[in-house]
Image (cartoon, rainbow, N blue to C red):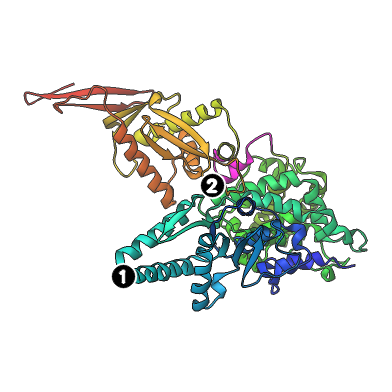
């Protein structure tokens, strides 16, 4: 018995030849679309505002695969204007509650002439007591606004200057960057431009996994005679059984990418998840004589783009798999490595996964002890490395590691703490601990020496090569009471995670510095005495900006107005010693 949902999943990723379901238009027409469709906060908000009678021109922009078309479908469905499996039209004006709603499906599919005509209809809808929703990429958006505004100015007898063009472009680009949920004025038009690429979509993955596991989607598999040895159905059962563990890792992985400017689109997430479940196998491919199918096509292996211990070349076309391999998460030495690889103890894995791990352990043990040819070959080390990676993938995806911070080992010390701070409510104690970490890190950054329980940060003049210096000139000081952690709600009411927090370091009650996840992880590493050289330009720029803010706010308490006195710091093995040097009468006094 075939389960056609498997074919639908395979069509979602670009690791195979059939990618028709990856296109939003095709998804809408599928019988499975409604079953796995996830309502987005943005779609709900727009539908609510239209229903309330507000007349607004909405322009939704973003990257390909960000779900722009799906949001338009959601809006029309919630308003009762679109039937199931009904295709979207190029443009359409709907009658709704004694008013109108004008929609444009995708500006990038239109000729330049149509773009201008449809765009003008959309932005003038509020002036005609209606609303509109228009989907557009950045290019057509800028071009149409320029033509519309320049035409209006010419009709008024004014010239559209280069400065006018720059002002218009800057207004739009600033909005695309800041993504504020408010109307902006461009020429004679008031519109709400929403850049979906700036919306935090990490929680989509958690909801997507739950949807893909729905029992009704897999009911044909229960009657299938192949279900007993089918690796696809095995993945569904395993992930369903340990759904919380799987969701925690995948959400943490996508959170790390998002906070490091590698945001995944909705299409890219679904592409990786679909491949993880099926490996692009079809029901016809499943045979009883398949070799170790449940291990070879295990969800944890395929999420990383592997069939068993071997990487699958076609899977590297999937962006999420490319990223996870670049990060080498399954190559990182973990706290549990000794237990698994030396003693052969896989008790940290759930029973169903443990059996697969023990089977692989037995196979590799036999190769080591019984095959002289294998032990003497160059293949030995490479195969061992691949074997260990496969076991780690099992542990990362399904293991019981909640007694310690595995995610800190994978993504950087402090990740788990930071993830909690920015995605949920936190206590004063947690804020205090973060402040202490930052104080210790800044002390290390400024002096080159690790210290605990820091109450004051000397702002020093150091060499650029970060070599240890015994003597440092102090240009100012920042005390503990000069720094404060400020946590506020995220600034977008369109984010899928409405509990998202923004962390700022307030300096001397005057300056605010945004604390990003890469910055907090960097502080955690510094506070622990790790010497790190970041290749992240955004992080390097952020550190330089923070140093500047600290110098602007920091001041030497006993600074001499005449400039005849300087303070130095002597780094000693047990503690730091401060000395003041005074220049007077051609003499140096200490």
Residue 414: percent from left, percent from top: 54, 38
Is residue 213 toward the left or the right of residue 540 in the image? right
Q: Residue 435 — which label?
A: none
Task: Tell me where residue 21 appears, x and y as whole percent.
Answer: 70, 68
Quote the CA–CA distance across marks 2 and 1. 39 Å
**Badge 1, how many Cα within 10 Å: few under 14, some, many 20+?**
few
The answer to whether residue 383 of the structure is visible from this angle is no
Give the residue drawn at x 31%, y 28%. 477
Coordinates of residue 428 in the picture (x, y in percent): 54, 26
**Label 1 secondary element:** loop
Question: Does residue 546 sit above or below 291 in this rendering?
Answer: above
Residue 124 in sight = yes
- Tell me the residue that label 2 is attached to: 492
- Magenta residue check for 224: no
Residue depicted at 71% across the width and 40% down the height: 339
Q: Which residues are magenta?
A: 402-415
Tell me which label, 2 or 1, sits earlier in the chain.
1
Depth check: give the residue in front, 109 or 197.
109
Disc 2 crowd, CA 10 A, few/some/many (<14, 14-19, 20+): some
Of residue 282 and residue 426, the one placed in the foreground of this image is: 426
Which residue carries the number 1 mark?
A: 157
In this rendered view, identify the residue nearer to me: 196 or 12: 196
């Amino acid at each position: 018995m075939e389960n056609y949902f498997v074919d639908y999943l395979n069509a979602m990723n670009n690791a195979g030849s059939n990618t028709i379901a990856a296109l939003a238009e095709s998804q809408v027409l599928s019988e499975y679309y409604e079953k796995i469709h996830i309502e987005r906060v943005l779609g709900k908000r727009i539908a609510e505002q239209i229903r309330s009678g507000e007349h607004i021109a909405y322009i939704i922009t973003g990257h390909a695969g960000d779900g722009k078309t799906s949001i338009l479908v959601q809006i029309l469905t919630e308003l009762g204007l679109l039937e199931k499996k009904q295709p979207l039209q190029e443009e359409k004006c709907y009658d709704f509650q004694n008013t109108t709603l004008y929609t444009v499906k995708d500006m990038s599919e239109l000729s330049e002439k149509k773009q201008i005509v449809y765009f003008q209809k959309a932005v003038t809808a509020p002036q005609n007591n209606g609303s509109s929703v228009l989907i557009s990429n950045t290019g057509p958006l800028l071009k149409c606004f320029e033509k519309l505004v320049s035409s209006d100015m010419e009709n008024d007898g004014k010239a559209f200057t280069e400065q006018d063009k720059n002002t218009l472009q800057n207004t739009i680009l600033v909005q695309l960057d800041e993504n504020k949920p408010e109307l902006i004025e461009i020429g004679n038009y008031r519109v709400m431009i929403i850049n979906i690429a700036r919306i935090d979509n990490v929680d989509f993955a958690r909801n997507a996994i739950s949807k893909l596991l729905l029992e009704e989607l897999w009911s044909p598999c229960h009657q299938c005679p192949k279900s007993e040895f089918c690796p696809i159905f095995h993945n569904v059962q395993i992930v369903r059984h340990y759904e919380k563990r799987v969701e925690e890792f995948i959400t943490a992985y996508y959170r790390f990418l998002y906070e490091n400017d590698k945001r995944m689109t909705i299409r890219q997430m679904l592409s990786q998840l679909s491949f993880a479940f099926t490996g692009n196998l079809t029901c016809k491919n499943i045979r009883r004589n398949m070799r170790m199918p449940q291990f070879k096509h295990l969800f944890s292996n395929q999420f990383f783009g592997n069939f068993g211990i071997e990487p699958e070349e076609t899977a590297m076309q999937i962006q999420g798999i490319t990223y996870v391999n670049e990060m080498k998460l399954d190559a990182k030495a973990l706290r549990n490595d000794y237990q698994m690889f030396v003693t052969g103890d896989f008790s940290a894995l759930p029973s169903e996964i443990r059996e697969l791990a023990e089977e692989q352990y037995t196979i590799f043990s036999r190769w080591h002890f019984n095959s002289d040819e294998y032990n003497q070959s160059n293949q030995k080390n490479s195969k061992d490395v691949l074997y260990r990676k496969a076991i780690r993938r099992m542990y990362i995806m399904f293991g019981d590691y909640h007694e310690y911070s595995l995610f800190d080992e994978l993504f950087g010390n402090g990740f788990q703490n930071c993830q909690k701070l920015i995605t949920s409510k936190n206590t004063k104690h947690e804020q205090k601990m973060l402040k202490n970490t930052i104080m210790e890190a800044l002390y290390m950054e400024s002096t080159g020496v690790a210290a605990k329980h820091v109450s004051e940060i000397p702002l020093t003049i150091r060499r650029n090569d970060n070599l240890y210096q015994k003597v440092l000139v102090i240009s100012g000081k920042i005390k503990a009471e000069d720094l404060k952690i400020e946590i506020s709600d995220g600034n977008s009411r369109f984010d899928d995670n409405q509990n998202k927090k923004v962390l700022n370091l307030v300096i001397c009650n005057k300056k605010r510095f945004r604390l990003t996840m890469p910055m907090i992880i960097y502080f955690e590493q510094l506070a622990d005495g790790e010497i790190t050289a970041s290749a992240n330009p955004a992080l390097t720029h952020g550190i330089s900006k923070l140093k500047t803010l600290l110098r602007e706010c920091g001041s030497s308490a006993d600074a001499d107005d005449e400039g005849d006195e300087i303070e130095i710091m002597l780094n000693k093995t047990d503690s730091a010693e401060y000395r003041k040097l005074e220049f007077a009468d051609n003499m140096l006094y200490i």
